[in-house]
Image (cartoon, grey):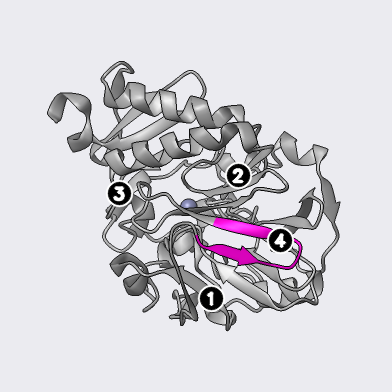
Amino acid sequence: MPDLSRPVSLLCLFLALSCAACAQAPSSESSLVAPDWCRKLPRPEYSRLQRIPVHDTWFEVYSVAPHVLAIYEPHQWQETVMYLVEGSQRALLIDTGMGIGDLHALVSQLTKLPVIVVNSHTHTDHTGDNWQFSNIASLNTTFTRTSAKGSTDVRTEIESGKLCGALPAAFDPANYVRRPWKTTRLLHDGDTIDLGGRILTVLFTPGHAPDSLCLFDRKNGLLFTGDTYYPGPIYVFGPGSDPAAYQKSVDRLAAFAPRVRLVLGAHNVPGTPPEILTELASEFAAVRAGKLRGVKAEDGLMKYTGPQITFFTEASHAPSSR
Ligand SMILES: [Zn+2]
């Protein structure tokens, strides 16, 4: 995959308040020019998916498997991808995106079933509209509990270089914050979420974030991987990131590969063949073993470009400095 989705200072994702590069006010001139990542959209993979028409132009919705919809935010540089998974009794919403569009209204159009939200992890780009939902299942980690208190570190996400087109008319940029939410069910590794005729298993996969999890629909071979894998540069840096834990997590996912039909990540494009799971584990092992040569990137990061996957880690985590 080309590196389309990460055109700005990488640490801004985690250091949005303090990142000088991101904190600069956009000039009126720059706001008229589409950023590079935006000019390269739409990604060609989407032409192969069935698009579901919806009224809200902030989101695009695609069918990716029977009763599984991908909800994509193409107008913001994170290009988050959420999933709405229906059983016969309940629907599972995996992640709630940036909190810029009215996700609750959209989901209400897409399903009449009661909705339970599970976040693939609680970084700001996956929890923005949690506050709109009353049924949220979460891991019981310190990181998760802190995230649930909300935060104001999202303002930089709506600067001109990070937007592709207009913000929704009902969105108020001046009051953009990540609002707090309440967890209504605690999740543990191995727990199952029964949607009625469809059961998803929770796999605790820390590394990208301390509360990263994957959800496995064993019967249908669907593995929802959040930011542990998506088609694009993988971030193993930032507060709470842990390369050793990430390695264990991707090794665990690689063991699932024979039972997976489709890998569904949380950015850029929904749907990658399962062979990527073994590749992910082996390429990151090569990073950690010093077999994949890294180059210095901005913000104190190292960039490792493997045969199929690019990783960013903190330079202090580079093999030579361990
Ligand atoms: Zn993310």
Sequence-earlier tag: 2 or 3:
3
Classify mark 2: helix, strand or loop. loop
Name the N-terminal-most of marks 4 and 1.
Answer: 4
* Mark 4, residue position: 85
Which residue type carries mark 2?
A: Asn
Residue 42 in sight in this render: yes
For disc 1, the marked residue is 136
Under mark 3, the amino acid is: Ser
Where is residue 58? Give x, y as percent: 69, 63
Mark 1 / mark 3, whichever is N-terminal: 1
> How crowded is the residue under tag 1: few (<14 C-alpha within 10 Å), some, or many (20+)?
many
- Is any atom of residue 2 visible in this view? no
* Residue 230 highlighted magenta (yes or no): no
Disc 1 versus disc 3: distance between alpha carbons? Answer: 23 Å
Q: Secondary structure at mark 1?
A: strand
On screen, residue 106 above or below 256: below
The residue identified by callout 3 is 241
Foreground mark, 2 or 3, reads: 3
Question: Distance between the Cα atoms at labels 4 and 1?
Answer: 15 Å
Mark seen at residue 268: 2
Part of the protein shown in magenta: 191-201
